[in-house]
Image (cartoon, rainbow, N blue to C red):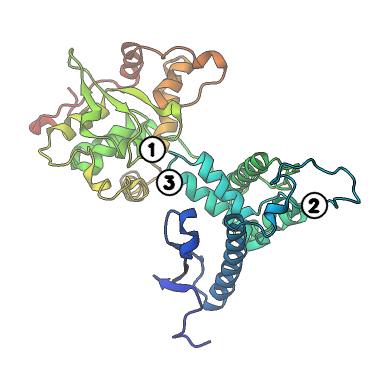
Amino acid sequence: MSETILPTFTFVKAGVFYFSRRVPKSLQHHYTSPRIVHSLRTRSARIAEARARRAADQLDEYWYHLRSQDTQLPGQHMLREAANLPRVSSPAAEPTVTQSSSVTLSEAVGIYLRLKGQGRAKTFHTMAHRACGYVLDICGDKPLDTYTKMDANTFRDQLIERGLAGSSLSRIFGTIRAVTNFAASEMGLEFTNPFSNVYFDRQAGVSKRQPVSQDSLGKIAEGCLKHDDERRWLIALVADTGLRLAEAAGILREDIKTDADGSMHVVIQPHPWRSLKTKGSERIVPLEGLSRWAAERVLAQVSGSQFAFPSYNRGETTSANSASAALNKWIKTLTGETITMHGFRHAMRDRLRAVECPSDIVDQIGGWQTGGIGHSYGSGYPLEVIRKWMKAICGPTWSTAPDSCCKLE
């Protein structure tokens, strides 16, 4: 194949091949976009050609199915149901035609996202497409009830060969089971899921995330106070609240509240540019210690942006991944240790344990799910109770005065 001629239905972006095909006008009412575009996840023209051809064949088959639904069946007016005639029960008089009500995996993904994806984060859709896309690449797009345990085991082996850790395998298999079980239930299929109970080492390649030590917390606090800029404010806010990085990076200036008594708190709520991981992640967290210093520095800035951290909110979504990479790198340079921003959440839990904070208060502070149906009753602990425990672990506040911003009050 000439290097200047691209495979049919493909284009190249940043060296990676993409599939692109226009949806026929007669079927565009089934779609949200007139063109289907997705990454073929390869830089090889040969592999891209094979994957593009397979995708095109799948679309042709599916479009035939859609056209059949939109087109009146020949002789439909002669069917007994259409004419309201009594059904003839004799097998000889009316031969039985068996039709499979199963759906293919690609159709199952569409059903799953159409019904369960409403209002969900972009990552929810991405994970469903990615996990099931792996199956399509390795096992092909087949009716759900034709996948076998051999398919599932082959799929597992291929993922292990790609070097995926046990935790990644768990997420992928969990998503595939969710998609296939939901679609089978919606279609009323008798379905034994071959992707259930597939054995693999869930600890393989998994490194335990370590909490940030007290020594490192001190170094990080000193570094944040010294540099005193947007990046360091974000680190400081997370360090003494245990917020998830995306939660903190996506807050608005107006989400930071000052109470009548001068104390401060931050409201964690979903926004169009940044969703929350769970419903229980909606919460109010008191700002004490270094997090209060960070909040005061954010509000003291004269900014035309509504965001507390505008550098990470320049597009349609909060850039939590780019924030994580940059901040993790700075922390490692400062402490000499491999510490991630998520380590502050682990440290927060340990710090609260150290002062014997009740576990359900710990869960409320971190937005963690508390077990037991009784914990879902009521609206949780009052803010002043939560603040008492945050003060117990965060210690004194940090002065924001220019001439003493690196000293304890």
Identify the mark at residue 98; answer none if there is no mark: 2
Q: Classify mark 1: helix, strand or loop.
A: loop
> Mark 3 = which residue?
122
Who comes first in sequence, dot 1 or dot 2?
2
Q: Residue furthest bottom?
A: 2
Q: Is residue 285 above or below residue 382?
A: below
Q: Amino acid at mark 1?
A: Ser
Q: Tell me if label 1 and label 2 are in contact, CB under 8 Å.
A: no
Q: Is 35 situated above or below 122?
A: below
Question: Which one is nearer the viewer's eye here, 63 or 364?
Answer: 63
Left-right relation of 361 to 80: left
| N-terminal label among 1 and 3 | 3
Q: Kindly identify which residue carries mark 1.
A: 275
Q: Please give the name of the residue rendered at 80% of the width and 53% of the height, measured from the top-left corner.
A: 97
The label on residue 232 is: none
Label 1 and label 2: CA atoms lie apart by 45 Å
Residue occupying image coordinates x 22% and y 32%: 294
Tell which tag, 3 or 2, sits nearer the viewer: 2
Q: Quick one: label 3, few (<14), some, or many (20+) residues within 10 Å?
A: few
Place of residue 402 in the rendered image (x, y in percent of width and height, measured from the top left):
9, 33
Can residue 395 be seen in this snapshot? yes
Q: Look at the picture and state if 17 lies above or below 289.
A: below
Which corner quadrant of the image does residue 362 belong to?
top left
Instruction: Determine whether the residue tagged by mark 2 lies in a helix, strand or loop.
Output: loop
Q: x and y percent of residue 384 in the render? A: 31, 12
| Sequence order check, earlier mark of 3 and 2 | 2
Quadrant assignment for the C terminus: top left
